[in-house]
Image (cartoon, grey):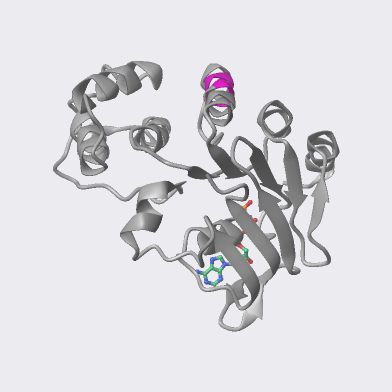
Amino acid sequence: MASVVLQASDVLVGYGGAPVCAPASFRLAPGKALALVGANGSGKSTLLRAVLGLLEPMGGTLRVLGEAPDERAAAFRTRVCGVLDDDAWFPALTVREHLYLTARGHGVLGANDVVTGLLEEFGLEQEQHALPVALSSGQRRRLLLAAGFARPRDLLVLDEPEQRLDRAMRDHLASRLIDEKAAGGAVLLATHDGDLVQQVADRAVFVSDEAVEVLTPAAAAARIAREPR
Ligand SMILES: Nc1ncnc2c1ncn2[C@@H]1O[C@H](COP(=O)(O)OP(=O)(O)OP(=O)(O)O)[C@@H](O)[C@H]1O
């Protein structure tokens, strides 16, 4: 496997020709996790969207698994899994059917058993035959996360995965991400959770319009504690 999963060199992102933050440079290797931290609206999600190939950078060089990100490319979508807070559901498919479709669509063997395990892991057994419209926002969040883990991936990109999770589920997510690294996966997450940064991340990137700095997880957690929310 490539020794670098993600390489950003002076990447500038924004909308309508206006950058949302300073140019960002960072790299991520297999088996490592990188956290993007910073104030609300600082540009974390926008950087994630560029990594996922959903937004063309305005400047700099961005390489994901050696290529410019392109979500239209099947090879890219096979290896890069994004979990955004986008609530993109098929309204007539149940929780179980969503997970099964995701796993089967990515060629997972024994998809039914994989789904059964994920339903239990993410506390969705009772809701497995419910439609998305019937779920609480926290249950929908857990379904989004479970769908991310239902399919193969080399890079897992998560936007504020801690949102709407209780403490126990946050801790479970942290251990799941540590396992992901141990299995050789790379994790890029935007987060406001300093504990999650310290539990999971090997490095952090502090995003702002003045400068984008690479920090230790402890330094990033200290910055998060100081940021107004
Ligand atoms: N589609 C869009 N078009 C124009 N501006 C946008 C769009 N999406 C986000 N923005 C703006 O870009 C800036 C950065 O937003 P972004 O969502 O990347 O920040 P963030 O760091 O992820 O914030 P938060 O922590 O609140 O999720 C904000 O000023 C936001 O209003």
Which residue: 39% across, 38% down?
Answer: 148
Which residue: 33% across, 33% down?
Answer: 150
Which residue: 57% across, 50% down?
Answer: 5
Left or right of 160? Residue 115 is left
Q: Which residues are magenta?
A: 171-175
* Membership of 172 in magenta stretch: yes
Residue 11 picture location, percent across and down:
67, 69
Q: Main secondary structure of the magenta part?
A: helix
Q: Residue furthest bottom?
A: 17
Q: Quadrant of residue 141?
A: top left
Q: Quadrant of residue 116?
A: top left
Q: Quadrant of ligand 1?
A: bottom right
Q: Vertical placement of 13 versus 133: above or below?
A: below
Say which of 166 and 6 sits in front: 6
Residue 176 picture location, percent across and down:
52, 24
Q: Vertical placement of 16 versus 213: above or below?
A: below
Left or right of 175? Residue 143 is left
Can residue 216 be seen in the rendering of this structure? yes
* Membership of 91 in magenta stretch: no
Q: Residue furthest left?
A: 92
Can residue 127 be seen in the rendering of this structure? no
Which residue: 39% across, 32% down?
Answer: 149
Residue 184 picture location, percent across and down:
54, 33
- Label tally: 0
Left or right of 61? Residue 205 is right
